[in-house]
């Protein structure tokens, strides 16, 4: 008999309401303690620990230890992508229909999706990169063009280092709220890290929402920043 993935086991783990709330809280990309996750799950710390051990044993979470403390986080981008996909098809808890994604306007505009940017801003970004022919999108694949490499490196992203990683450099991620693709993979993560480093964006306290500075908003609008040279139109692929 051929071995098949045990989807039912993973579904049962994620399907528990308490564990679902904990996993959703970790989608911000930060590591949280068991006490913090107990508050997110609405359960006692002892109960939270039991849930977290099950998620860790299944490979959905990883644990980082610092001194006496243990911090939990999503095990990797594959787990985060699966959770984001579940958010797309999951019914709203209050039973409302018609609006997809989060109710909060800030989360709909821009938010953290594990380690990359999601929301309206991220969808517009990928569309603009494609329009300028700095990336090619075909089905479930995204590739950076030669002109796109010039732009990303001008922003300060080391593409050579990203290519050396085992993680795919580019991949499209279906956006929970927009139902269109945004940029994921190691390039999506590096791009968000660069926005943080340039202080173009910051996290809203206690939320996955991202807040852009005036300079950051201007950068996303025209994709140009001090020291960044955009490829000339004549250089683009025909």
Image (tube, helix red, strand yellow):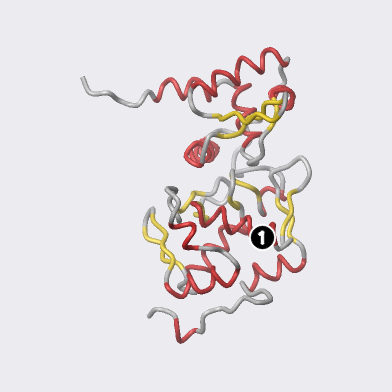
Q: Position of residue 199 (x, y in %)?
A: 74, 61
Q: Residues within 10 Å of mark 1 (few under 14, many from 20)?
A: some
- The reply, left or right, for residue 21 in relation to residue 234 is right
- Residue at 45% from the left image edge and 83% from the top image edge: 235
Question: Which quarter of the image is occupied by the N terminus?
Answer: top left
From the viewer's perspective, is residue 205 above or below residue 47?
Answer: below
- The reply, left or right, for residue 235 in relation to residue 107 is left
Q: Position of residue 117 (x, y in %)?
A: 60, 53
Q: Residue furthest front?
A: 67
Q: Residue furthest left?
A: 1
Q: Quadrant of residue 193?
A: bottom right
Question: Which quarter of the image is occupied by the C terminus?
Answer: bottom left
- Residue at 34% from the left image edge and 26% from the top image edge: 5
- Residue at 50% from the left image edge and 36% from the top image edge: 79
From the viewer's perspective, is residue 221 above or below residue 238?
Answer: above
Q: Position of residue 85 (x, y in %)?
A: 50, 40
Q: Quadrant of residue 90?
A: top right
- The reply, left or right, for residue 71 in relation to residue 169 is right
Q: Secondary structure at mark 1?
A: helix
Instruction: Count the numbered circles shown.
Output: 1
Q: Which residue is mark 1?
A: 195
Residue closer to the observer: 78 or 221:
78
- Residue at 63% from the left image edge and 41% from the top image edge: 29
Q: Position of residue 54 (x, y in %)?
A: 54, 18
Residue closer to the observer: 148 or 90:
148
Q: Residue furthest top?
A: 46
Residue closer to the observer: 163 or 233:
163
């Amino acid at each position: 008999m051929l071995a098949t993935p045990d989807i039912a086991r993973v579904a049962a783990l994620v399907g528990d309401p308490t564990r679902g709330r904990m996993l959703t809280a970790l989608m911000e990309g930060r590591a949280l303690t068991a006490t913090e996750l107990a508050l997110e799950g609405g359960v006692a710390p002892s109960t939270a620990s039991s849930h977290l051990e099950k998620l860790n044993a299944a490979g959905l979470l990883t644990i980082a230890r610092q001194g006496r403390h243990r911090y939990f986080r999503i095990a990797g981008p594959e787990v985060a992508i699966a959770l984001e996909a579940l958010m797309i098809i999951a019914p709203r808890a209050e039973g409302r229909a018609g609006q997809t994604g989060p109710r909060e306007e800030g989360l709909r505009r821009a938010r953290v999706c594990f380690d990359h940017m999601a929301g309206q801003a991220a969808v517009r970004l990928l569309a603009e990169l494609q329009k300028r022919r700095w990336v090619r999108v075909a089905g479930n694949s995204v590739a950076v063009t030669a002109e796109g490499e010039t732009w990303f490196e001008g922003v300060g992203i080391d593409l050579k280092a990203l290519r050396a990683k085992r993680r795919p450099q580019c991949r499209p991620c279906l956006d929970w709220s927009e139902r269109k693709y945004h940029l994921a993979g190691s390039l999506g993560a590096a791009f968000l890290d660069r926005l943080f480093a340039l202080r173009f964006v910051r996290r809203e306290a206690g939320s996955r929402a991202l807040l852009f500075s005036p300079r950051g908003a201007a950068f996303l609008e025209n994709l140009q920043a001090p020291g960044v040279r955009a490829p000339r139109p004549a250089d683009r692929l025909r």
